[in-house]
Structure formats: structure tokens, C-alpha cells
Amino acid sequence: MIDLDALAQAAACLEPLPVSTLRLARLVCSAGDSPDVDRVVEVVQFDQALTAGLLRSANSSWSASRTEISNVRDAVIRLGMGPVFAMALGVQVKARLSAPIPEYGLGEQELWNHSVAASLAAELILRLSPRHLPIETVTSALLHDVGKLVMSRFLSEDLLDALATSAASGATRMQAESDILGVHHAELGGLILQCWALPEALVRGVTYHHTPDVSLDPVAYGVYLADVVAKTVTESADDNADLDVFSNAISELELTADAFDEICGLTRDRFAEVLQQFEV
């Protein structure tokens, strides 16, 4: 069992997000479907790295813009608030998510690659699902595994052996963490987002991304499915995926099997291009 108080303290002590990012979060997530574009542009235009990434994305082959987009306002309108907010968070957390996490079998860049693929998949789910999903789903998908950054610091060799034994018996990694550690990385990720003062919709999406049936939250279902797609695209372990949860997620989001296959294919086709958009 991990010292949960020490775990919570470690989560709280992570470097905070910049004030500009939190301001953008409030602008985008509190306004529903009608955020103030001018105020969003005001926040974004003073961040050089974010501006460069947005312009690359707005002029990418995926965006298929017929005219070159050369200013932040046009880029924000072209891309939409969900992808803009996800990119803003991505610029801030890229270095943290790029570090190797051997306790989870992740080499350098692997968690970042998986996170970007999940964010892209979530964006496509929003486009193809008949059900209306909050724009926070895209950013929540990007951050869904952030709890691994802190959890890994507390995993001793004995605990890793116990987790491996549990996995060998058929338990998912999340189930093993709950049973052996008293908390799983998704719950810890939700705590980290709370410490970063991010909106509650993001917290729920991260906390329940392995257990959307517990929350019945559309963001959680979207992030769960985006995680499944990302594992397919980046050839990550399937983590003994629960077929019942998968079926429920497909049903809740009103997606067909063909639509899911399309999301996987489009995510795979676009993945390398999207990774480049986060490069400074």
C-alpha cells in the first residue's frame, strides 16, 4: 500500500500551470458552445510557441484551408476551441509527458505520443459522434495518463512485482493498482488536474477514463474510447481491455463499428503530422 498522503502531497507539489493557460481554460470551458473568440485570441497571441503550433495546424493538409492562415484569430476560428485549448495545454506539459516512465514500461516520448494520439482521436470522436460532447473532451484525452508521472515515483521493486503478479492473473493494470496501492493512476490524474485548478469536466474525464460506466459522464466515455484508439495507433499494450465497457462506450456515443474503424484510420493517418504541430 502506498502512503496516500505522500502521494497527494506529491501531486500538489507539481509545477503549476501558467496563469495564461488557466485563464484560457476558464474562457473556453466556462462558455459552453459560445466562448469569446476575441478574448481567447488575446490570451493565445502572446505565447510564441502556441501561436506557431496553431498556425501550423491551421495550414496543415488536414485543415484543408484554401487560403493561407497567417494570424491567430483566423487560426482559432478555423480549428475550433477544443483543439486550441488542447494545444495550449500540450505546449505546457509536453516536456513532462515526454520523459521515460520505466515503471509503466514507457520509453522516452512514448507517453507523449500516446497522449497526442488520444487527443486527436477525441477530436475525431467529437466530429463523428451524433451525441454532443463537451469540447473539454479533447484536452481531457491529452492529459488522461498524467497520473502516471507521480504514481511512478512511488512504485518500489516489491510493488512492481506485486502489480505484475496481479496482471498475470488477468487483472487490468488499473484494477491491480486499486487492489494493491489503494488508488489507481486515473484517480491520481484527476487529483493533479484539481491541483492545477483545471475545470471539473477535465477532472472527471481523467478520473473516470478507465471506468466511464461509474460516472456515466460523456467526457469520460469519450476519453475512454480515445484511449482505446490511441493504444491501437501507437501499438501500446491493450491493458486487457474490458469488452463490456468498450461496447457501452460505443453505445453511449452512438457510434457504429464502421465509425470507430474510421476514427482509428484517420487518427493513424494524421498522427505524425499532429505531433509536428507541437514542435517549437
Image (cartoon, rainbow, N blue to C red):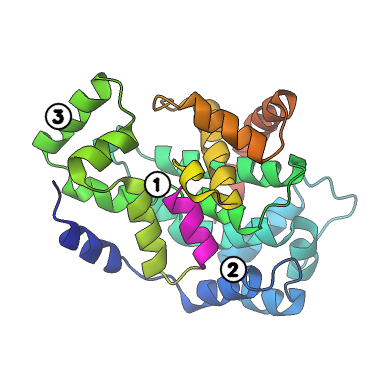
**Badge 1 vs badge 2, beta-carbon distance below 8 Å:** no
For mark 2, does the 10 Å Cα neighbourhood hold few (<14), some (14 to 19), or many (20 or more) residues?
few
Q: Which residue is mark 3?
A: 161
Please tell me whether mark 2 sits on a helix, a strand or a loop. Answer: helix
Residue 83 lies, with reference to residue 209, above or below; the image says below
Q: Main secondary structure of the magenta part?
A: helix
Residue 138 lies, with reference to residue 77, above or below; the image says above
What are the residue bounds of the magenta stretch? 199-208
Give the CA distance from mark 2 to mark 3.
45 Å
* Amino acid type, label 3: Asp
Q: Residue at x 50, y 44 (%)?
A: 212
Give the CA distance from mark 1 to mark 3.
25 Å
* Amino acid type, label 2: Gln
Q: Which residue is mark 2?
A: 48
Please tell me whether mark 1 sits on a helix, a strand or a loop. Answer: helix
Q: Residue furthest top?
A: 169
* Amino acid type, label 1: Ser
Q: Which residue is mark 1?
A: 98
